[in-house]
Amino acid sequence: MISIIRILVKIKIFKRLIPSLTKKIFELFNIKNIIIKKEGIFLSINLKNPIDRQIFFKDDYEEEQINYLKRLIKKYNIKRFIDIGAHIGIYSSLISNENIKVIAFEPYKKSFEQLKLNKQLNNFDNLTINNYALSDESKKITMWVSEKEKTGGMSIFDKNDEELKKYENKNLMKVEADSFIGDDVLKFEKEILAIKIDVERHEYKVLKGINKLLKKNDVVIQVEIFKKRQNDIIRYLKENNFINFHSINNDFYFKNF
């Protein structure tokens, strides 16, 4: 059935009709989550969420980035992957299928519960999940998003965040969460690590919070950086002996070895 739907959405006349109709049917029968199979793993997805819809209808979410990261993990024989900003665990789940230990961080409770379910569905004993954010401070934080279903865009509230200017404060969905200094949590030394950072404009503070981790290990980093912040992040990592060796769309790849 899913394969037929994916064929239909490629046809121009059905491109918008099929997703809209499917979403309405799920709402009518109060179906909140469905389970699909992708690359040999099970994923629980919510069709109200734009990222989940993309996976369901197109069987694709950052496919190029994930496959490239997998190749780097194999190339450098990396045995530990750290997923900072895991959301529902697309990266964590697909990479947990490899011979590697995975540590995932997702502060938003609803996304974390989906991540937890995806771990359980696949019996991933090598996947450790944490329901908090990593930053350069340990404290209570407020997270926000412009629309409650767009949980993939959930961001730590920062009054200097340029995105806030696009919305009225009263219309934002806000939730409370916890934040911890990365170096207080991740205390590995003399390892080869792969790290993915997708934290909606909080990249600099995450990197500051894992400064010791970056200095004490050989590290490959994939970090999503939008244009306004690219120069600052690249400069910071360069000052810490990282080189930028590749990019895919807004995802940049760095290593210090």
Image (cartoon, rainbow, N blue to C red):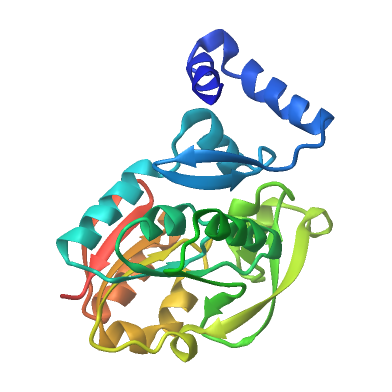
Q: Which residue lies at the image location 38% right of the left edge and 51% below the top edge? A: 250
Looking at the image, the residue that sits furthest to the top is 13
Relative side of 67 to 134, left or right: left
Furthest residue toward front: 123
Q: Quadrant of residue 172?
A: bottom right
| Residue positioned 22% across, 53% down in the render | 71
**Viewer-proximal residue among 5 and 140:** 5
Q: Is residue 46 left or right of residue 78?
A: right
Left or right of 244: which side holds 231?
right
Q: Nearer the viewer, residue 187 or 255?
A: 187
Rendered position, 256 above or below 189 = above
Q: How many marks?
A: 0
> Measured from the top left, where is residue 147 in percent x and y?
73, 48
Q: Quadrant of the C terminus?
A: bottom left
- Residue 162 vs residue 233, the one in the foreground: 233
Residue at the (79%, 59%) spot, across then down = 169
Residue 220 visible here = yes
Residue 31, how many percent across, how many down?
76, 37
Quadrant containing the N terminus in the rendered view: top right
Q: Is residue 253 above or below residue 241?
A: above
Instruction: Give the image location of residue 134, x and y in percent.
Output: 53, 77
Q: Residue at x 17, y 66 (%)?
A: 76
Residue 166, image x, y percentages = 67, 51
Up the image or down, 101 lies above or below 35; here it is below
Is residue 226 at least partly visible in the picture? Answer: no
Q: Nearer the viewer, residue 165 or 20?
A: 20
